[in-house]
Image (tube, grey):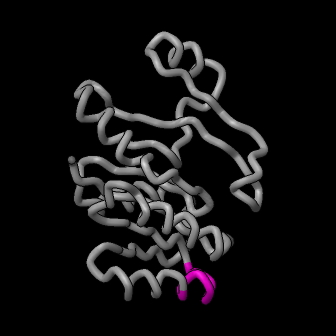
Amino acid sequence: MAKYSVLISLYKKEKAEFLTQSINSMLNQTIMPDEIVIVKDGLLTEELDEVLKKYEIEFPNLFKFVMIERNVGLGLALNLGLKHCKNELIARMDTDDISKPDRCEKQLKAFLENKQLDIIGTMVDEFSEDPLKIKSSRIVPTNQKEIYEFSKKKERFQSSNSYV
């Protein structure tokens, strides 16, 4: 199976508990990432820094941290993070997202089976505090015609669960 990077941007207002759940969901993938690149978008809280330090100690060769001195926003932070990813395939995660254990395996398989794909996403279940209490689900189209029609009205892809 192909190697892939995980790209996460982290901002000081994120919750340490959610960050931990997000990272753990990537560490529990059926196909482990080759690297996890975390962009520190500005100075972080002590609690967030402690979470990152724990992972850096436990997985010294897996995590790569990119520091931006002042907050520049998600888009610019991710663009900078892309430059630090060593793999062609990159799985996006937000710090408050939890991926199912087979997410990356399924997305990697789709890329390998269809070389014409440039990006791939998934459906999304949304929750507030408890992942078992789903508030809503977003089911996205799966063929070119449906995607074209859908993209006229809504966000094309949920970027935090996409592969590029």
Relative to 57, say whether 12 is above or below: above
Q: Is residue 49 magenta?
A: yes
The quarter of the image holding the C terminus is top left
Report the span colored magenta: 43-50
| 112 relative position to 93: left or right | left
Q: Position of residue 92 (x, y in %)?
A: 45, 52
Q: Residue at x 53, y 14 (%)?
A: 146
In terms of depth relative to the viewer, which is nearer, 31 or 117? 31
| 130 relative position to 24: left or right | right
Q: Position of residue 27 (x, y in %)?
A: 41, 66
Relative to 12, say whether 137 is above or below: above
Q: Residue furthest top?
A: 145
| 113 relative position to 96: left or right | left
In terms of depth relative to the viewer, which is nearer, 84 or 54? 54
Q: Residue at x 21, y 48 (%)?
A: 2
Q: Position of residue 132 (x, y in %)?
A: 71, 54
Q: Is residue 122 magenta?
A: no
Q: Is residue 164 visible?
A: no
Q: Position of residue 67 (x, y in %)?
A: 43, 76
Q: Is residue 128 visible?
A: yes
In terms of depth relative to the viewer, which is nearer, 148 or 22? 22
Q: Residue at x 49, y 73 (%)?
A: 40
Q: Residue at x 51, y 19 (%)?
A: 147
Please identify the dominant SS of the magenta region.
helix
What is the total number of numbered labels drawn onto the structure image?
Answer: 0
Quarter of the image holding residue 109?
top left
